[in-house]
Image (cartoon, grey):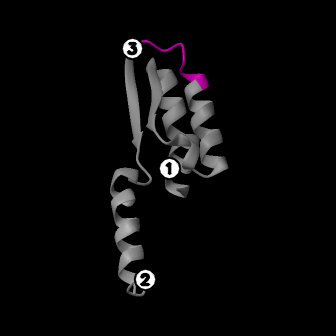
Amino acid sequence: MSLLKEYLATRARRTCSKNDIRFRVVGRMNELDASVQKELAQGLAATSSCRGMTFNIALELRRPHRDRGRLPLARAATSPPAG
């Protein structure tokens, strides 16, 4: 996460603003560290009026559709047999 935060703070916002590129986030921004969320929010605000192009960052921190199936299987595998 520190690499993403550093990139956002040092390059992305400045480059996007300079080149009229709107910055957007797709995915679970709320699952990131608070300091990274802050950098993302600042980038979104700083480029909200840009209309040249859109730079999307796609975030996927976990996969609930997969995790839902694994959890019951894991529980069943570790549970003592009934009876």
Q: Is residue 5 above or below residue 24?
A: below
Location of residue 63 in the rendering, given as x and y in whole percent from the top left corner: 38, 53
Location of residue 75 in the rendering, given as x and y in whole percent from the top left corner: 42, 75
Q: Earlier in the sequence, mark 3 or mark 1?
A: 1
Label 1 secondary element: helix
Three-letter amino acid code of the residue under disc 1: Leu
**Which residue is under mark 3?**
52
Marking on residue 75: none
What distance separates the C-alpha of mark 2 from that of mark 3?
57 Å
Q: Is residue 49 above or below residue 37?
A: above
Q: Is residue 28 left or right of residue 73?
A: right
Q: In front of the other: label 2 or label 1?
A: 2
Q: Residues within 10 Å of mark 1 (few under 14, many from 20)?
A: few
Q: Residues within 10 Å of mark 2 (few under 14, many from 20)?
A: few
Label 2 secondary element: loop
Q: Which stretch is magenta?
A: 45-51
Marking on residue 79: 2
Location of residue 26 in the rendering, given as x and y in whole percent from the top left corner: 43, 34
Residue at x 54% of width, y 21% of height = 47
**Which residue is under mark 1?**
4
What distance separates the C-alpha of mark 2 from that of mark 1?
40 Å
Q: In front of the other: label 2 or label 3?
A: 2
